[in-house]
Image (spheres, rainbow, N blue to C red):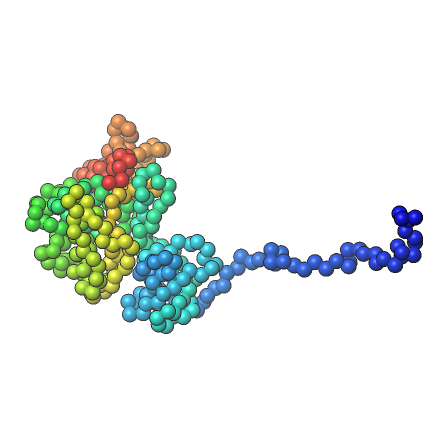
Amino acid sequence: MGGDVDGSTLLSRRQYDESDVRVRPGKSSRPRTKDRPAHLDAVEGMVYSVDRGRWGVVLGGDPHRPVVAMRARELGRTPIVVGDRVGVVGDLSGRPDSLSRIVRVEERTTVLRRTADDTDPFERIVVANASQLLIVVALADPPPRTGLVERALVAAYAGGLSPMLGLTKSDLADPDEFASQFADLDIPVLAVGQDNDLADLTERLTGRVTALIGHSGVGKSTLVNRLVPDADRATGVVSGVGKGRHTSTQSVALPLPSGGWVVDTPGIRSFGLAHIQPDDVVAAFTDLAAAVADCPRGCTHLGPPADPECGLDTLEGKSLRRAMAVRELLASLATNDSW
């Protein structure tokens, strides 16, 4: 009795098939598109500061039209650094608490990169689209480190920037002795200390974007304050152990009164070049690039005995002297010393 079910009971039950089941689409089943909005109304600007997920942008490159922007969702984790040229939409009033969106990052013309050290696989972009790099070096207190200068020069040449040397504290040591080490590279060398006239430097900076780097304590922030009187950048005191105290923690682009921008970067303690190959450096010199075109595959351009058939050894005169100076820079890549 208990297990029997009569036929009328079966017929009274609704018989279901697949047509009775309605599937309600969830979020995961919605069609996605790779098409991004064109943002044809985006206003061009330049990033002048970065701070915890917010970017300061000057619209049209005009320092009097600053806005604060966030990165648009469609950009994902696209890196945006000081100097980047971007497209911005949204609230462009620049009023306090207003927020716009960066929807596009233009292709970079130059990039200054470094790594924490020569074993670090992660590149840090220091600044984008700068046409020049001013390497600030103190001739004393702390004593100059040739290694940093060589590595900064390598990064400049590889990234497409024109380098310059700015020497401070020339009243304490002879600048010619230090500058002579780089004479064959035809790098402008300028005295930019606290008591030096900056007219020549100002002329070279006007109308261009120039990145400034240097060890802490060499007088870089003091120089920035002279170039941009209202920059209000802190000036540090050199510590007793020969290493300066960091006085800038974020890169920032500052407008020059005469036109152009200087990008004040944090004082650095090391300059890794894990991302750079010898050919990246040689390519910056037209005569040297032509000479190495027929070098054997894998040539490091360091010359004998490592590279007995390097094309740099076929050069003569000024080009040969420049090649030997470049070899000194390439040797700094091989030392695995990020100082």
Q: Is residue 10 left or right of residue 103?
A: right
Q: Is residue 315 left or right of residue 200?
A: right
Q: Is residue 268 left or right of residue 193?
A: right
* 328 relative to 264, above or below: above
Instruction: Please state which of residues 34 and 115 is positioned toward the viewer in this rendering.
Output: 115
Q: Which residue is depicted at the point 22% across and 37% down?
A: 328
Can residue 144 be seen here? The reply is no
- Asked which quadrant contains residue 310, the reply is top left
Q: Is residue 34 left or right of residue 222?
A: right
Q: Which residue is depicted at the point 21% across and 44% down?
A: 149
Give x and y (percent) for residue 135. 21, 49
Q: Which quadrant would the C terminus be assigned to in this image?
A: top left
Q: Which residue is depicted at the point 18% across and 49% down?
A: 217
Instruction: Please state which of residues 240 and 266 is positioned toward the viewer in this rendering.
Output: 240
In the displayed orientation, state which residue is furthest to the top. 305
- Asked which quadrant contains residue 53, the reply is bottom left
Give x and y (percent) for residue 249. 27, 53
Can residue 112 be seen here? The reply is yes
Instruction: Please state which of residues 178 and 15 is positioned toward the viewer in this rendering.
Output: 15
Q: Which residue is depicted at the point 89% across and 56% down?
A: 9
Give x and y (percent) for residue 151. 25, 42
Give x and y (percent) for residue 103. 43, 62
